[in-house]
Image (spheres, helix red, strand yellow):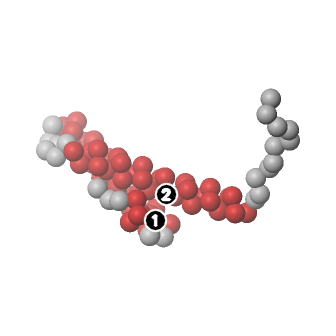
Amino acid sequence: MTKVANFRDRSDDQLNDELTKLKKEQFNLRFQRASGQLENTSRFRVVRHDIARIMTVLGARASGAEAKSTKPAKSAGGKK
């Protein structure tokens, strides 16, 4: 299991490469599970969580870049 801080230190290209690698591993794990050859069942969960962590970091970077380029609109009015 990889910590989120390790993913935040990497560049977008490195994260995309790692994401591709993990998705291929997930695909292979699904085949092993279907054919009854999967021995380490906990690896499936770890891979899914690492994929989610990478996608979260990439999404936060994308929305962070968006937020820096545009100012949020102020709402008109107060409490209803």
The answer to whether any part of residue 17 appears in the image is: no
Q: Which quadrant, please, contains the N terminus?
A: bottom left
Rendered residue at 25%/42% (across/down): 31
What residue do we see at 79% from left, 34% from top? 79
- Who is closer to the viewer here, 69 or 79? 79
Is 61 left, or right, of 11 in this rendering? right
Task: Give the image location of residue 35, x and y in percent.
Answer: 18, 37
> In x, y percent, where is residue 32?
21, 43
Say which residue label 1 marks: 8
Above or below residue 21? Residue 46 is above
Residue drawn at x 42%, y 49% is 52
Q: Quadrant of the C terminus?
A: top right
| Residue at numbered disc 2 | 57
Most foreground residue, 23 or 72:
72
Q: Amino acid at mark 1?
A: Arg
Q: Which is more toward the observer, 18 or 78?
A: 78
Q: Are marks 1 and 2 in contact (CB under 8 Å)?
A: yes
Which one is earlier in the sequence, the residue at label 1 or at label 2? 1
Q: Say what secondary structure mark 1 lies in.
A: helix
- Name the kind of residue labelled 2 in the image: Val
Please tell me how crowded label 1 is: few (under 14), some (14-19), or many (20+) other residues with Cα within 10 Å: some
Q: On the image, which quarter does residue 69 sit in?
A: bottom right
Foreground residue, 52 or 25? Answer: 52
